[in-house]
Image (spheres, rainbow, N blue to C red):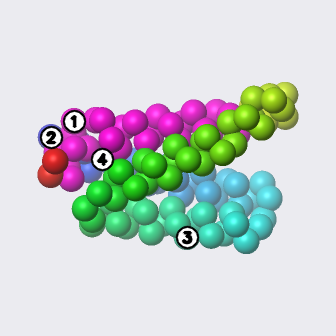
């Protein structure tokens, strides 16, 4: 069970990194570069099983979604990709908090 949880955690961490790289390529900015660094650090901390890091990353993803969802919906024509990204973020957050194998991986 914990091995499956590790795969989930690795997949979510990899998703965060790929998302950050794509955002960096779509529009280079210091904040996108910082997000890439934060994503790499989050993956390393999750694979190191730092206590509560799964909850911290989940809260971060949810806050990012909530901050941008209004703009993404109101500008759906040009922002649909970012809305999809936000929905994936919420899904990843839910997996980090509720998925039984992820809980087993973190020993909870």
Q: Earlier in the sequence, mark 2 or mark 1?
A: 2
Label 1 sits on a secondary structure element that is helix
Numbered label attached to residue 100 = 1
Label 2 sits on a secondary structure element that is loop
Residue 81 in view of the camera: no
Q: Nearer the viewer, residue 88 or 73?
A: 73
Residue 15 horizontal/vertical position (percent) = 50, 49
Residue 58 horizontal/vertical position (percent) = 43, 47
Q: Earlier in the sequence, mark 3 or mark 4?
A: 4
Q: Nearer the viewer, mark 3 or mark 4?
A: 3
The magenta stretch is 82-106
Residue 25 horizontal/vertical position (percent) = 74, 59
The quadrant the N terminus occupies is top left
Q: CA distance from mark 1 to mark 3?
A: 28 Å
Task: Residue at 78%, 65% (x, y): give it.
Answer: 28
Q: Are marks 2 and 1 in contact (CB under 8 Å)?
A: yes
Please give the residue where the numbered disc 2 appears in the rendered image: 1
Q: Earlier in the sequence, mark 1 or mark 3?
A: 3
Q: Nearer the viewer, mark 1 or mark 4?
A: 1
Label 3 sits on a secondary structure element that is helix
Predominant SS of the magenta segment: helix
Q: Nearer the viewer, residue 74 or 29?
A: 74
Please give the residue where the numbered disc 4 appears in the rendered image: 7
**Is residue 94 located in the magenta-colored stretch of the structure?**
yes
Please give the residue where the numbered disc 3 appears in the rendered image: 37
Task: Residue at 52%, 48% (x, y): give it.
Answer: 61
Left or right, residue 49 beside residue 23 = left
Numbered label attached to residue 75 = none
């Amino acid at each position: 069970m914990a091995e499956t949880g590790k795969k989930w955690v690795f997949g979510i961490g990899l998703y965060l990194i790929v998302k950050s790289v794509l955002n960096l390529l779509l529009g280079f900015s210091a904040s996108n570069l910082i997000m890439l660094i934060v994503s790499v650090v989050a993956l390393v901390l999750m694979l190191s099983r730092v206590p509560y890091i799964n909850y911290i990353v989940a809260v971060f993803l949810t806050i990012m979604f909530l901050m941008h969802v209004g703009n993404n919906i109101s500008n759906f024509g040009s922002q649909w990709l970012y809305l999809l990204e936000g929905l994936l973020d919420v899904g990843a957050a839910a997996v980090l908090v509720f998925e039984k194998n992820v809980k087993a991986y973190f020993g909870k």
